[in-house]
Amino acid sequence: MPLTEPPAGPVRTFLDFPFAGDLDALQADFAVLGVPFGMPYSPATMANDQSKAPDALRQAAEDPGYTREHFDWDLGGPLFDGREVTLVDCGNVTADSADHRAHYRRAEAAARKIFAAGATLITLGGDHGIPIPIMRALEVFQREVTLVHVDAHLDWRDDINGEREGYSSPIRRASEMPWVGPIVQIGLRGIGSAREREVADARAYGANIVTAYELQEIGMAAVLERIPDGGPYYLTVDADGLDPTIMPGVISPTPGGLDWPQTRTLLHGLVRKGRVLGLDLVEIAPSYDVRKLTLIYAERLICNFVGAAVRAGQLRAGLTAR
């Protein structure tokens, strides 16, 4: 079975960029990869609404030509700024109903190939378990990576119902990877699965935890100063880390998250600080959305990341796997 397959439903890639299914021959500056399925905590969650998000985001674009070619006020010009840039969509990682962990193994293998090709990886989830195999693939760089995490929740659970790679555990699993160094967590608020013991573990590791309320007081520019300079970085974004007024299509909406200017400041500021190896956007539940608002902001988030990275010179000539 191949590692990836074309998007489902009406065949459409992200913003109608080319489909690239042969990862061994990949030549791209940016590669989009769907990873629909996390590891379930119960039989009832083996398939959930979040698994539909990668294709829902692809299908939601109303006028890809405008987005790709017209002046973008978020960026100060067109998406690629008149430069020779290649963005491809690698489709969705294939799954096996008889072996749930095969999806993670294939996701890691696909990510390793994409990183080895020198491309910046943009991963579409799926729940927040899916960054675990992607972060494992960061090993190929043989460099310490700073992890930047946007979320309402801490995600330091060791396991739930015996499952250690589900959506409540990605930052715990990242902390165990030798190539992951500093961890900065932004936007925490409300109540999640974390108990006092997980908070203590995160603090003992040295995680720099910035609650949504501290962010409101000090501003995103001050938060960026807490992120070590130079990179490289990996950015994982849970949609519920943003305020539900702009991203209502999530299963656990919590008031008080990042607003759009704060999100944009983080994206643009991080690529100016150093190389961002990849970005994932997870936990969008399309059936919970309102007037496609979540999908619109998701597309804006990805385009701001790509456009800002292009302007920061983060193309294939940058950091590559060793």
Image (cartoon, rainbow, N blue to C red):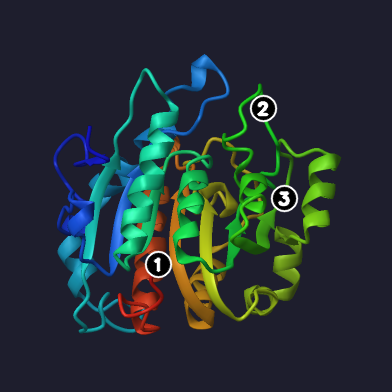
Q: Nearer the viewer, residue 294 or 311?
A: 311
- Of residue 97 and residue 50, the one placed in the foreground of this image is 97
Q: Which mark is residue 160?
A: 2
- Amino acid type of disc 1? Ala
Q: CA distance from mark 1 to mark 2?
A: 34 Å
For the N terminus, the image quarter is top left
Q: Which residue is mark 3?
A: 189
Q: Quadrant of the C terminus?
A: bottom left
Secondary structure under tag 2 reads loop
- Label 2 vs 3, first from the N-terminus: 2
- Residue identifier under label 1: 321
Q: Residue furthest front?
A: 322
Q: Residue at x 32, y 55 (%)?
A: 113
Residue 102 rendering spot, x and y as whole percentages: 39, 31
236 or 55, which lies in front? 236
Q: Are marks 2 and 3 in contact (CB under 8 Å)?
A: no
At 74% from the left and 60% from the top, the residue drawn is: 207
Q: Is residue 160 left or right of residue 166?
A: right
- The percent position of residue 208, horizontal first and vertical second, equals 74, 64
Report the Cα–Cα distance between label 2 and label 3. 21 Å
Residue plotted at (62% across, 57% down): 178
